Image (spheres, rainbow, N blue to C red):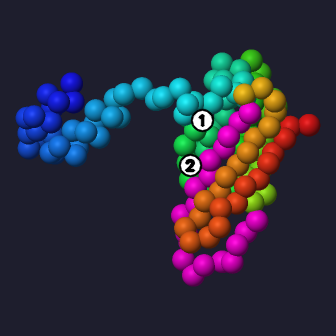
Amino acid sequence: MHALYVSRPSANAGGVLQVTRRVLAAMPASAQSLSSSPYLDANLFHFDEKLISSLIRPRTFSDHPIKFAARANPERLRFQLHPGSFQAGPMPTRPRKQHVTYHFHPVYPFVLGVLQTFVQPTQMIIMMRI
Protein backbone atom coordinates (compact mmCIF):
# COMPACT_ATOMS: atom_id res chain seq x y z
CA MET A 1 0.00 0.00 0.00
CA HIS A 2 2.76 2.42 0.94
CA ALA A 3 4.70 1.69 -2.25
CA LEU A 4 1.66 2.60 -4.32
CA TYR A 5 1.32 5.99 -2.65
CA VAL A 6 5.04 6.74 -2.69
CA SER A 7 5.38 5.91 -6.37
CA ARG A 8 2.80 8.57 -7.29
CA PRO A 9 2.69 11.28 -4.60
CA SER A 10 0.39 14.08 -5.71
CA ALA A 11 0.45 17.73 -4.82
CA ASN A 12 -2.73 17.25 -2.80
CA ALA A 13 -1.12 14.51 -0.68
CA GLY A 14 1.73 16.82 0.40
CA GLY A 15 4.60 14.72 -0.91
CA VAL A 16 6.29 11.52 0.19
CA LEU A 17 6.76 12.60 3.82
CA GLN A 18 3.08 13.39 4.32
CA VAL A 19 1.98 10.17 2.63
CA THR A 20 4.30 8.18 4.90
CA ARG A 21 2.89 9.92 7.99
CA ARG A 22 -0.69 9.22 6.94
CA VAL A 23 -0.01 5.56 6.25
CA LEU A 24 1.81 5.10 9.59
CA ALA A 25 -0.98 6.88 11.48
CA ALA A 26 -3.52 4.48 9.96
CA MET A 27 -1.63 1.41 11.18
CA PRO A 28 -2.61 -0.15 14.52
CA ALA A 29 -0.45 0.36 17.60
CA SER A 30 1.97 -2.39 18.52
CA ALA A 31 1.16 -4.65 21.46
CA GLN A 32 4.24 -3.45 23.35
CA SER A 33 2.92 0.13 23.52
CA LEU A 34 -0.40 -0.79 25.17
CA SER A 35 -0.84 -1.22 28.90
CA SER A 36 -2.84 -4.22 30.08
CA SER A 37 -3.52 -2.77 33.53
CA PRO A 38 -7.11 -3.13 34.79
CA TYR A 39 -6.92 0.48 36.01
CA LEU A 40 -6.79 1.65 32.39
CA ASP A 41 -9.72 -0.52 31.29
CA ALA A 42 -12.39 1.84 29.96
CA ASN A 43 -15.10 -0.68 30.87
CA LEU A 44 -14.15 -0.54 34.57
CA PHE A 45 -12.90 3.00 35.22
CA HIS A 46 -13.59 6.48 33.94
CA PHE A 47 -10.61 8.85 33.77
CA ASP A 48 -9.44 11.90 31.82
CA GLU A 49 -8.01 10.53 28.58
CA LYS A 50 -6.16 13.78 27.85
CA LEU A 51 -3.91 13.11 30.83
CA ILE A 52 -3.59 9.34 30.69
CA SER A 53 -4.54 6.42 28.44
CA SER A 54 -3.76 2.77 27.86
CA LEU A 55 -1.38 3.78 25.06
CA ILE A 56 2.06 4.26 26.64
CA ARG A 57 3.35 7.55 25.28
CA PRO A 58 4.46 10.90 26.70
CA ARG A 59 1.67 13.33 27.55
CA THR A 60 1.82 16.99 28.49
CA PHE A 61 2.39 17.30 32.23
CA SER A 62 -0.42 18.70 34.37
CA ASP A 63 -0.41 19.43 38.11
CA HIS A 64 -4.06 18.42 38.40
CA PRO A 65 -4.75 15.06 40.04
CA ILE A 66 -5.87 12.28 37.72
CA LYS A 67 -9.18 11.00 39.06
CA PHE A 68 -10.43 7.45 38.57
CA ALA A 69 -14.14 6.73 39.04
CA ALA A 70 -15.98 3.44 38.63
CA ARG A 71 -18.03 3.14 35.43
CA ALA A 72 -20.87 1.53 37.37
CA ASN A 73 -21.04 4.46 39.82
CA PRO A 74 -19.36 7.49 38.11
CA GLU A 75 -20.10 10.00 40.89
CA ARG A 76 -18.06 7.96 43.37
CA LEU A 77 -14.33 8.63 43.18
CA ARG A 78 -12.33 5.38 43.53
CA PHE A 79 -8.81 6.84 43.73
CA GLN A 80 -6.61 9.55 42.25
CA LEU A 81 -2.99 10.05 41.22
CA HIS A 82 -1.22 13.21 42.31
CA PRO A 83 1.39 14.06 39.67
CA GLY A 84 2.29 17.23 41.60
CA SER A 85 4.53 14.98 43.72
CA PHE A 86 7.39 15.53 41.28
CA GLN A 87 10.10 17.82 42.69
CA ALA A 88 9.95 21.28 41.19
CA GLY A 89 13.21 22.45 39.69
CA PRO A 90 14.43 26.05 39.48
CA MET A 91 11.85 28.32 37.89
CA PRO A 92 12.95 29.26 34.36
CA THR A 93 12.32 32.70 32.89
CA ARG A 94 9.84 31.17 30.46
CA PRO A 95 7.86 27.98 30.98
CA ARG A 96 9.39 24.79 29.65
CA LYS A 97 7.43 22.00 28.10
CA GLN A 98 7.19 19.01 30.39
CA HIS A 99 6.11 15.53 29.34
CA VAL A 100 5.13 12.69 31.63
CA THR A 101 4.74 9.00 30.87
CA TYR A 102 2.86 6.70 33.24
CA HIS A 103 3.71 2.99 33.32
CA PHE A 104 1.05 0.91 35.09
CA HIS A 105 1.86 -2.52 36.46
CA PRO A 106 -0.32 -5.12 34.70
CA VAL A 107 -1.58 -6.68 37.97
CA TYR A 108 -0.61 -4.73 41.10
CA PRO A 109 -1.75 -1.17 42.00
CA PHE A 110 1.64 0.29 41.15
CA VAL A 111 2.40 3.22 38.80
CA LEU A 112 5.76 4.55 37.69
CA GLY A 113 5.70 8.14 36.45
CA VAL A 114 8.57 9.52 34.36
CA LEU A 115 8.78 13.32 33.94
CA GLN A 116 10.97 14.72 31.18
CA THR A 117 11.79 18.42 30.98
CA PHE A 118 14.01 20.06 28.39
CA VAL A 119 17.61 20.58 29.66
CA GLN A 120 16.85 19.10 33.10
CA PRO A 121 17.37 15.61 34.52
CA THR A 122 14.59 13.08 34.14
CA GLN A 123 12.52 12.55 37.30
CA MET A 124 10.74 9.36 38.34
CA ILE A 125 8.07 8.87 40.94
CA ILE A 126 6.52 5.66 42.25
CA MET A 127 2.83 5.75 43.16
CA MET A 128 1.05 2.91 44.95
CA ARG A 129 -2.55 2.41 45.93
CA ILE A 130 -2.74 1.19 49.50
CA–CA distance between discs 2 and 1? 9 Å
For image coordinates 65% across by 57% down, the residue present is 115
Label 1, residues with CA under 10 Å away: few <14, some 14-19, many ≥20: some
Please indicate, yes or no, whether residue 48 appears anywhere in the rendered image: yes
Quadrant in the rendering for residue 3: top left
**Vertically, is 17 above or below 2?**
below
Locate residue 23: give its quadrant. top left
Q: From what the image shows, is residue 72 above or below residue 77?
A: above
Q: Residue at x 17, y 43 (%)?
A: 16
Q: Seen in the image, is 9 located left or right of residue 98?
A: left
Q: Nearer the viewer, residue 60 or 31?
A: 31
Mark 2 or mark 1: whose residue is earlier in sequence:
1
Residue 12 is situated, as x and y percent measured from the top left of the image, at: 11, 41
Which residue is tagged 1? 53
Which residue is disc 2 drawn over? Answer: 59
Most common SS among magenta residues: loop
43 lies left or right of 6: right
In the image, taking residue 46 as reference, residue 16 lies left or right, namely left
* Type of the residue with mark 1: Ser
Looking at this view, is 13 or 64 the one in front?
13
Q: Are marks 2 and 1 in contact (CB under 8 Å)?
A: yes
| Residue 91 % position (x, y) | 66, 77
Q: Quadrant of the C terminus?
A: top right
Q: Residue at x 81, y 45 (%)?
A: 127
**What secondary structure is found at the residue carrying circle 2?**
strand
Please tell me whether residue 115 belongs to the stretch shown in magenta.
no
Residue type highlighted by circle 2: Arg
Snapshot quadrant of residue 47:
top right
Range of the magenta residues?
87-105
